[in-house]
Amino acid sequence: MRLDPFGQSYSTDPATVWRHLLDSGERVAYDDELDMWLIAGHELARTVLADPRRFSSATTLTPMQDPHADAAAILARLDMPPVTLNADAPTHTRTRAALAAVLATTSLRTEQRWADLVRRHAEHFADHLAHHLAATPWPDVDLVELFASRLPLSVLLDILGIPADDMARIAAWADNFAALFWGRLDDDEQISAANGLLALWDFCRDIVVLRAGTHQDGQPTGLIGDLVRYRNGDDNRLTLPETSALVLTLLIAGWESTAAALTHALEYALSDRIRWARLAADGHYASIHTEETLRHSPAIDAVLRVTTTDVDLDGILIPAGSRCLVLIGAANHDPGVFEQPGTFQPGRARLGQHLSFGAGPHACLGAALARLYLSTALSILARRLPNLTRADGFAHRYRTSASMRQHTSLPATLGPARCPVAHGQLPLVGQS
Ligand code: HEM
């Protein structure tokens, strides 16, 4: 059984392939069709992620497959400097310090700073969805389009200090971004995604230059303002292009991943009335439901590294210059760490050891914010629409990608209202 990131069977059921790789004993294996080393297993994934000197992140934002010549020509015009995600030390250390200084990275600070803002946006989109359902005679809505995708982007723009009026064009530019790097697009789609990325880069450059200008006489707002103040005109701290690149990184790292994770969490919640009811009633359940979703179905289930030297990993020699796909999903399904890894069990033992936010020096800087988004959105939607349910005939369909597991849609509808809380059917956590 091969890992074919662009095939239907891996797309719809990656866990079977992860299990096969873990059980086969070949946890470090070269795939000649992909021209990549596949790294499976929790311990090995942690080892690679913790070792940026031998496993570089420089190619993280390089298309996995050679793009069409016209798309490549467009991408060649992208003069965005590497920062955080696709940078190695010392640039990585310096630019990560800048982001860490302006982002609230602990859960307490994230709560204090952004809980109200996230709640306000979640209520707005939950109301919007409720009105949409009420206005449709045979309600059957797509939760990806109307909720899971819009909410994280609108929160992110508010946090950054970008006007909400810009949301539609930013969404259009950034759509297919992930697929351009880690998916498979036809020639026209590649060209359109590359043009979108270029337009988004121009937008980020312009807004940073504008805000840096306002710094002279007024206080630029939002996280962009915070970055401009952090830079304080000192290129040794952060250049202006690096500031713009950090804004673009936040938009691409913080949007689609959170939207994808929220859709997974909604799918698991809506597949079981008791889970849905418990989300409305119990904030602790919302956080363990979120965490188990992240472990069981990581939105980013693989990350790319390239070796800077010959490396002996688990007794196997990986030559210098090799691309390595670190399978986060396989790490999260390693039976040596998680019992019955294929079962969805909120509150399970060792839940905190999943690698869905990466590990080591590149570990996700938005993890606390993403957790806040997910648990707030789930609680609010479950309270606002207690009889929401998955539409009949739901089938798993994902965008093809070697890294990001994104539903193409999540159709939902209103079912008969019968709340298990009101009927005394809500079991204790761990009983489901
Ligand atoms: C559920 C949602 C999210 C998931 C699953 C996720 C996952 C990840 C993963 C796996 C990495 C490591 C990448 C690597 O090692 O190559 C990462 C890095 C990063 N994430 Fe997230 N992320 C999420 C949400 C966010 C949010 C909301 C933000 C910010 C608003 C964010 C900002 C970043 C940044 C800046 C990095 C780069 C850190 C570095 O390279 O030092 N992420 N994320």
Image: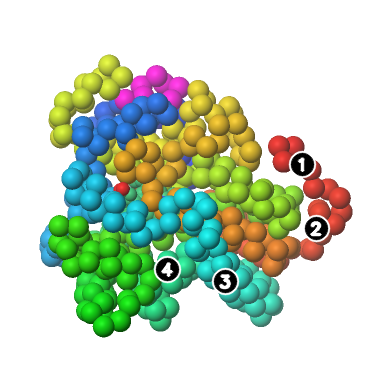
**Which of the two labelled residues, at mark 4 and mark 2, occupies the earlier sequence position?**
4
**Which of the two labelled residues, at mark 2 and mark 3, occupies the earlier sequence position?**
3
Residue found at the far right of this picture: 423
Dot label at residue 159: 4
Q: Which residue is mark 2?
A: 419
Q: Nearer the viewer, residue 48 or 149?
A: 48
- The amino acid at mark 4 is Ile
Return the x and y of residue 77 as percentages of the image width and height: 13, 65
Residue drawn at x 43%, y 56% is 104
Q: Is residue 27 magenta?
A: yes
Disc 1 from disc 2: Cα separation: 16 Å
Q: Name the mark nearer the viewer: 4 or 1.
A: 4
- The amino acid at mark 2 is Cys
Return the x and y of residue 193 as percentages of the image width and height: 28, 65
Using a 10 Å C-alpha cutoff, classify the residue at mark 4 as few (fewer than 14 neighbours), some (14 to 19) or many (20 or more).
some
Return the x and y of residue 153 as percentages of the image width and height: 44, 67
Disc 3 from disc 1: Cα separation: 30 Å
